[in-house]
Image (cartoon, grey):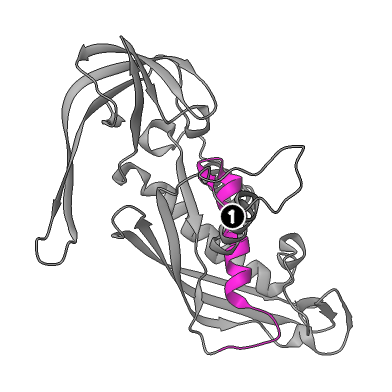
Amino acid sequence: MVTMRKTGVLWMVICLVMVLAGIGWAGQNGMRYSIMVTKFENRSGWHGHWDLGDAWGAVLTDSLNATGRFIVLGEKDMRREAMAEQDLAASGRTAGGGKQVVTGQMTPAQLLVKGDITHFDPGTSGGKGGIGFGGIRIGAGGGTSEINAVMYIIDSSTGQVLASKKCYGKVTKKGLSVGISKGGFSGNVGGFKKTNAGKAVEKAVDEGVAYLISMLDEIPWTGDVIMVKGQKVYINRGAREGVTEGRVFQVGQLTTIRDPNTGEILDQEVETSGKIRVTKVKEKLSICEITEGSVQKGMTVSLAQ
């Protein structure tokens, strides 16, 4: 019985590793999506000396990056700082020489992840007594940390919620306990994950990330034709997005149907006019050949049916 229990636990661990690594279960045939985490709102009623939304966002960004399934862009505040740096470079007030920051080179996000933290209990025993250092306190008692959150996956081009997931994490530490003391989360994700609160957040985040990966087959993957030279077609997707030589895409004109009163996007469909096969892959673009029909600059690229 002990052997069977150990085997069962081992199998669950293997499955979890495969989900988080995206091995063999890749949605959309292994294609990668650019994704950005926006700040999660703390609606739990809990307030302390550290920002719960920042901690959740940092752990989620780290977990998404670890899967290898996404092109993880900086969080909104990071991109704002990058754009500010671009604006400064464009103003002519920076010193010449060396590599200059150029405007218009921000990678657009295909998907956005945002949400609300609805309940949080960091556990209190770790913050009393014991020894504290770097915002983390090790105490002599045990404690339970618990968190609930709702995660939304949003299409950045339409603002439509594609999927949502309620995430839950709970960690009970008996004996020696680790908690958050004054100063709390300071951007050190590794250190935060060693705390009871951090472990609970990580558990809930991993549940949400696994769900997001399982939904990728339901989320259309697209690109654009950026140049056509004879039979050569250049698209703005490359090795970074999981494109490989020999892959076939269908190409067509994207039609967007909007509500005439509100301007809301009601539906989008691609009327296929041709097919292309990838002959050369670079980091951020691919060169293809036309195998069927006609292709023009500006057309939408999608996976062949």
Looking at the image, which residue is at 30% across and 29% down? 303
Which residues, given as a range, are shown in magenta?
A: 46-72
Is any part of residue 8 visible from this angle? no
- Residue 39 drawn at (x, y percent): 52, 69
> What SS does tag 1 mark?
helix
Locate residue 53, reporting x and y percent: 57, 74
Is residue 51 one of those drawn in magenta?
Answer: yes
Q: Residue 274, located in which quarter of the rendered image?
A: top left
> In the displayed structure, would residue 76 be above or below residue 14?
below
Q: Is residue 253 left or right of residue 26?
A: left
**Drawn side of residue 87 relative to residue 230, left or right:** right
Residue that numbered label 1 is attached to: 87
What residue lies at 75% left-to-right and 87% top-to-bottom?
A: 125
Question: Which quadrant is the C terminus positioned in?
Answer: top left
- Reply yes or no: does residue 264 show up in magenta: no
Q: Nearer the viewer, residue 213 or 71?
A: 71
Out of 113 and 287, give the one closest to the viewer: 287
Q: How crowded is the residue under tag 1: few (<14 C-alpha within 10 Å), some, or many (20+)?
A: some
Residue at image position (44%, 22%) is 286
The picture quadrant where one finds residue 75 is bottom right
Q: Position of residue 167 (x, y in %)?
A: 46, 68
Identity of the residue furthest to the front in this view = 92
Q: Position of residue 106 (x, y in %)?
A: 52, 46
Residue 171 appears in view: yes
Of the residues shown, which amino acid type is indicated by label 1? Answer: Asp
Asked if residue 44 lies left or right of residue 236, the reply is: right
Residue 123 in which image quadrant: bottom right
Between 135 and 195, which is closer to the camera in this rendering?
135
